[in-house]
Amino acid sequence: MVKGEQLYEGKAKKVFATDDPELLIVSYKDDATAFNGLKKGTISGKGVINNQMSNLLMRYLAEKGVPTHYVQELSERETLVKKVSIVPLEVIIRNISAGSFAKHYGVEEGIVFDAPTIEFSYKNDELGDPLINEYHALALKLATKEEIETIKKYSFRVNEVLKDFWKQCGVTLVDFKLEFGRLADGTIVLADEISPDTCRLWDSATGKKLDKDRFRRDLGGVEDAYQEIMKRLTDAFEG
Ligand code: TMP
């Protein structure tokens, strides 16, 4: 596989072309941002952890019936993925109140819901990723009705699979964000990443935050938290 020109640099990853038009290489950086890029920093070793964690979880999800963009881990920080056109919707699933949910609705963090919630944000940095409903997404032609149904089905499936998985690691899956893409033939697959950048993960026994909220909220121990959550995950896969 020949690594070609850099096509794109995002906040946490770079994307490169390959000699196969259907495949791309993503390269994970240690850069961290929050609040739509307003807060900037570095989380040393994050790129390696997010790459390896996302790949492990995507391989696991594929076994459980969720198709993904994952093809092959190339190195500590680099992964070969299927080229997709990203559906410009961020899908957020929540099991427990936290973050913007707690803020918007004036409730404390930590309320366990009877059933998971789903919401969409319009993936648009200039607009600050505003919340959007399905009707708005259809009006803006961001996705078709069928695509949105598929995305919802896969997102709840991801939640069931990952909630159970993290539970075995002594970790509570509070909420997370997913992105989906279309392959050349229109098939919807899970894309982007699943990592402590995109999930809230709390130690089940102590409630300690083991995710990017430590960076967002200046809680300290950011690198240690990323290492701890990665250790829990690798122990579960090896054990
Ligand atoms: P929120 O409570 O701030 O809306 O975040 C919900 C989940 O989505 C949380 O697990 C963090 C994740 N997330 C991202 O992955 N990217 C983002 O830009 C934001 C705002 C949240």
Image (cartoon, grey):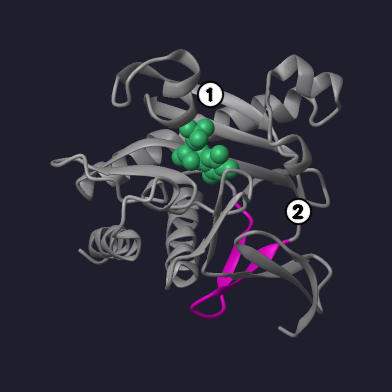
Note whether 61 is above or below 31 in the view shown: above
User: Which residue is located at x 42 percent, y 51 percent?
Assistant: 212
Which residue in the protein does label 1 denote?
118
Note whether 153 is above or below 45 in the view shown: above
Amino acid, disc 2: Val
Corner quadrant of residue 188: top right
Note whether 173 is above or below 141 in the view shown: below
Left or right: 131 in relation to 113: right
Q: Nearer the viewer, residue 90 or 55?
A: 90
User: Which residue is located at x 29 percent, y 21 percent?
Assistant: 112
Is 70 included in the stretch rendered in magenta?
yes
Residue interval drawn in magenta: 68-82
Q: The N terminus is located in which quarter?
A: bottom right
Gap between marks 2 and 1 measured at Cα: 23 Å
Q: Nearer the viewer, residue 217 or 20?
A: 217
Q: Is mark 2 within 8 Å of ligand 1?
A: no
Using a 10 Å C-alpha cutoff, classify the residue at mark 1 as few (fewer than 14 neighbours), some (14 to 19) or many (20 or more): some
* Coordinates of residue 213 in the picture (x, y in percent): 40, 46
Q: Secondary structure at mark 1?
A: strand
Amino acid, disc 1: Ile
User: Which residue is located at x 22 percent, y 45 percent?
Assistant: 208
Q: The C terminus is located in which quarter?
A: bottom left
Corner quadrant of residue 43: bottom left
Q: Is residue 177 visible?
A: no
Toward the bottom, the furthest residue is 2
